[in-house]
């Protein structure tokens, strides 16, 4: 049985209810879910673990974009348009970014919290099964796309986690040093005239990384607010932090769309401010307002 037949076999389960459910569940592997998880850990639990998660996620995203460019495998619905369910995903299929993302998030969360929280272990296990399945159900990926993506995400999570641990107390310095060549590389790549969709995720990833790492360093060196909120303070902190991030995420999107639509450099700047707002600006406000 070839791989497109596997997708067709899975789609024999289709129904309006499952179509909607799968479109919702697949979002667990989206970058917005990652941003939410990283910020929750940063604001409420452990900044260094959030740093590790961001480092791992961005490393994975860069590897994913490079591999997609190398293999350039069309998605199943390109071969058979009837397989597409919901919104079509742009770009190439191999390896699956959603499967890779959920592999990264689940591995880092399991390493740091899963061993002491049995319920979390089962939730993460369910996520790494469900998200890859949704990608095939929706006609966006083949079986090998999701298996390789998941395996790659898990492997990168373990490898980069070890690297971050080796940085010791200087992780903020290494973060800034690594950012410089990454920014230079993506901007050089953009000069070769590839289309917007091919480079969007790379610019978004490196932009978010740049802002977060700058904010993380400023927070660690100058803000240094490490109180863990409880009760109503936790609610206030969540509302304040979410407002800061939303201002940059939504506000800059509206402003930049008036300048240019689908612009890589503006995407970079917007996500850089989202990363910086979620780290340094949010922590400064938490400290100022004592929440």
Image (cartoon, rainbow, N blue to C red):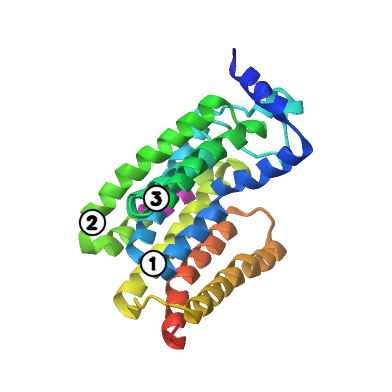
Q: Quadrant of the N terminus?
A: top right
**Residue depth check, mark 3 versus mark 1: number of the one nearer the observer:** 3
Give the residue number, with chain letter if any, for mark 3: 118
Above or below, 99 relative to 119: above
- Residue 179 lies, in percent from the top left, at 37, 56
Between 48 and 12, the one lying in front of the other is: 12
Q: Quadrant of the C terminus?
A: bottom left
- Residue at the image point whose x is 21% and y is 59% from the top: 168
- Residue 153 lies, in percent from the top left, at 42, 40
- Residue 114 lies, in percent from the top left, at 37, 51
Distance (Cα) linking label 3 and label 2: 29 Å
Give the residue number, with chain letter if any, for mark 2: 167
Distance (Cα) linking label 3 and label 1: 18 Å
> Start and end of the magenta stretch?
181-187
Spot the residue most to the bottom: 289
Q: Main secondary structure of the magenta part?
A: helix
Between 45 and 78, the one lying in front of the other is: 45
Between 71 and 153, the one lying in front of the other is: 153
- Residue at the image point whose x is 24% and y is 54% from the top: 165
Above or below, 238 relative to 33: below
Say if mark 1 contacts mark 2, CB within 8 Å: no
- Residue 230 lies, in percent from the top left, at 43, 77
Q: Residues within 10 Å of mark 1 (few under 14, many from 20)?
A: some
Upstream in sequence: badge 3 or badge 1: 1
Report helix, strand or loop for mark 3.
helix
Say if mark 3 contacts mark 1, CB within 8 Å: no
Q: Is residue 260 visible?
A: yes
Distance (Cα) linking label 1 and label 2: 20 Å
Upstream in sequence: badge 3 or badge 2: 3
Q: Quadrant of residue 133?
A: top right
Give the residue number, with chain letter if any, for mark 1: 45
- Residue at the image point whose x is 63% and y is 29% from the top: 75
């Amino acid at each position: 049985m070839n791989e497109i037949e596997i997708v067709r076999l899975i789609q024999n389960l289709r129904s309006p209810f499952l179509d909607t459910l799968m479109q919702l569940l697949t979002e667990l592997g989206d970058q917005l879910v990652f941003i939410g998880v990283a910020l929750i850990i940063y604001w409420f639990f452990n900044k260094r673990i959030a740093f590790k998660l961001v480092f791992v996620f961005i490393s994975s995203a860069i590897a994913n974009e490079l591999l997609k460019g190398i293999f350039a495998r069309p998605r199943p619905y390109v071969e058979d348009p009837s397989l597409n369910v919901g919104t079509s995903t742009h770009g190439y299929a191999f390896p699956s970014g959603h499967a890779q993302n959920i592999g990264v998030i689940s591995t880092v969360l399991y390493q740091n919290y899963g061993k002491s929280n049995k319920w979390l272990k089962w939730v993460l296990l369910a996520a790494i099964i469900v998200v890859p399945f949704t990608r095939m159900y929706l006609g966006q990926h083949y079986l090998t796309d999701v298996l390789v993506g998941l395996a790659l995400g898990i492997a990168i999570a373990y490898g980069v986690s070890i690297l971050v641990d080796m940085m010791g107390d200087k992780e903020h310095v290494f973060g800034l040093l690594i950012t410089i060549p990454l920014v230079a590389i993506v901007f050089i790549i953009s000069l070769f005239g590839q289309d917007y969709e091919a480079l969007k995720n790379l610019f978004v990833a490196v932009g978010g990384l740049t802002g977060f790492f700058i904010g993380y360093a400023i927070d660690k060196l100058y803000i240094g607010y490490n109180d863990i909120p409880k009760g109503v303070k936790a609610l206030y902190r969540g509302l304040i932090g979410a407002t800061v991030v939303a201002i940059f995420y939504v506000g800059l999107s509206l402003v930049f769309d008036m300048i240019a639509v689908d612009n890589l450099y503006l995407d970079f700047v917007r996500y850089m401010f989202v990363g910086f707002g979620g780290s340094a600006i949010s922590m400064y406000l938490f400290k100022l307002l004592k929440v």
